[in-house]
Image: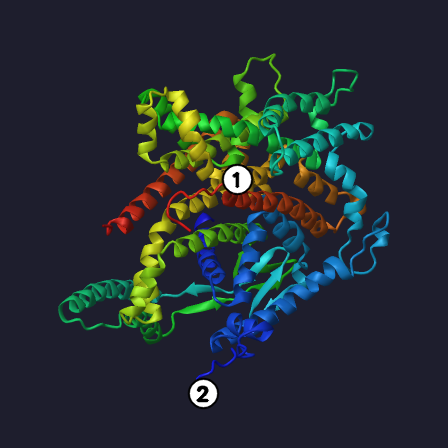
Amino acid sequence: MSVLGIIAATILGFIMGVARLSDNWLIAKLSSVYIEVFRNIPLLLQIFFWYFAVLRTLPSPRQSIEFMGSFLNIRGLSMPAPVAESGFSLVVGAFVVGIVLTFVMTRWAHKRQDETGQIFPTFWAGIGLIVGLPLVVFLFAGMPMHLDYPVLKGFNFRGGMTLIPELVALWLALTIYTAAFIAETVRAGILAVPKGQLEAAFALGLPKVRTLRLIVIPQAMRVIIPPLTSQYLNLAKNSSLAAAVAYPDLVAVFAGTTLNQTGQAVEIMSMTMAVYLTMSILTSLFMNWYNKRMSLIER
Amino acid sequence: MINEQQPTLPAPASTIGLVGWLRTNLFNTPLNSIATIVMLYLCYIWLTPIFDWVFISADWTGTSRESCTSGGACWVFITQRIDQFMYGFYPSEETWRLDLTFLVFVALIAWLVWPNLPKKGLVAAFTLLVFPFIAFVLLSGGYFGLEHVETHKWGGLSLTLVLAVVGIVAALPLGILLALGRRSEMPIVRAMSVAYIEIWRGVPLITVLFMASVMLPLFLPEDMHFDKLLRALIGITMFQTAYMAEVIRGGLQAIPKGQYEAADALGLGYWQKMVMIILPQALKLMIPGVVNTFIALFKDTSLVLIIGLFDLLAIVQAAQNDPKWIGYATEGYVFVAFVFWIFCFGMSRYSQHLERLLHTGHGNRA
């Protein structure tokens, strides 16, 4: 849950943070409205809104909204699920090989650039290796995969895979809420890069994209990472609000199921807290390590 | 004749006025023009129905759900139950006490916030030291012929405000003490502060509240009865104190070492040094962080719903399950969101204003 939320919130947050600095007035204003609105509304309220006001009012399975083989109804979103057949492991193998090759290639390209100054199109070659290689293997192996479509049987859908509404509500609320905070962090980070750095990069004749990638982002990341860590920790802790809409997360499993089975309230709650504590300490250790790695290249 | 100075020409029409503004801000590159048009279209298809739902085809007056016929938002649901949303289950003939407390509080805060009013120190001391007792007597009753109202009857926005205000008032001084403890030179004090801060910051508030409501009674003697509201308050305060302490520590670290050394050189003791030299400077730097913590605390008060206290969110949630008003969840949530938003946005704007006001040129930022 937390991982899903972190990924989505990071992407949305970075987009919104950059959008707020856009030189297009409309885009900048829209993203600041988004940030100010969702930052100032309690998360629990947002979860309730998505769960009770939006997802609970969806039609019953028989009147599902249908698009591209997926069905949206009060029991969640039923989607076609990919099912692996024999020979699919070859494709997975090709994927792993692709990643390893890309890694090796990047090292080699760096070395060559250091020696000869020639730039190798690492990005496109990497995409080709990671996506293209498994795709070729997939086609040669005779497409060892089919889609399992959800079918209406009785009162509910069978087959496929279903995202339950509790998960969707929690995911939406956590993502939208945390992304508003991440957007502010990102904006602060980008603004913290002195203007002279940008001007120097342009004076050196670097194109805009490479300026962003080689000059702005590395410096901004140093400012962004510490607050970003605490946002991730907040998100992980906030995911415990899942209990409010009865999604079986950690708190619900511990404090609900186990508590009912054993009746040992004190021990169970201590265990729950200990698990969260371990999680957040591990995350912050990892982020500290990453932070150190990023900030090593200082004067 | 030829060298005579020509009158200054007006700027080209395309760079001034509305057209110029549009050209520089919305249509300066082809890509931006496309983005603007796409965004305008998206705004149009999303915002028009929302605007229509909220204002144009909404129902504002009436007494029951039969008044809601136009297909828009049914604000009748809110207007009919506004008393309950504000006061919870407080006896209706006693609600003047809540109103009075709230008015006094608003007046005190306005006095503190308004620029150039005299005797701010006295008012602040009154707000922090005397007002809580007056408020407690007024709200809870039991003295001076006021009827005693038990805390389980408190609810709605008034409960939310009580939780938030008590949390804020208690967390700030405790947070300062903890932050000083963490930067102390005494190893035991420091270790205990660090342990406290890291433990409370590492666990979710919801488990803290759960602990406070389920476990605290287990540790206390049998005959000692603790109020549920008080337990929630203790939980929230202890939790937010840890966050507050970290924010304050950030402020303390930002004060140059020379200030500490100068205070030492003047022969000031530890507390004199802190109260007269360090904290006034640090507090100024900490305003954004402290207000952020306040806002977080205010939003977190909605979690008391989990342990069965009826704050604003919980009472609206409960009202939706009234068979007379089923199906108006969205209106309820929009109302609650609006109330929370006003408070939080107001706080954040005031902190920005304060930041500019107190900005006396530290660091080299413009």
Q: Earlier in the sequence, mark 2 or mark 1?
A: 2
Q: Residue at x 31, y 22 (%)?
A: B187
The residue mark sitting in front, 2 or 1, is 2
Residue A264 got which mark?
A: none
Q: Nearer the viewer, residue A40 or B103?
A: B103
Residue A39 sits above or below residue A130 on the image: above
Question: Which is more toward the observer, A99 or B257?
Answer: B257
Image-based side of A218 in relation to B86, left or right: left
Query: Label 1 neighbourhood size at 10 Å, few (<14), some (14-19), many (20+)?
Result: many
Q: What residue type is disc 2 on?
A: Ile
User: Taking B247 as reference, is A121 above or below it?
Assistant: below
Chain letter of the residue beneath label 1 in the structure image: B
- Within the image, what quadrant is residue B320 found in? top right
Say few, some or many: other residues with alpha carbon within 10 Å of mark 2 (under 14 / 14 to 19 / 20 or more).
few
| Residue B20 horizontal side relative to residue B95, left or right | left
Amino acid bearing label 1: Val
Residue that numbered label 2 is attached to: B2
- The quarter of the displayed image where residue A58 is located: bottom right
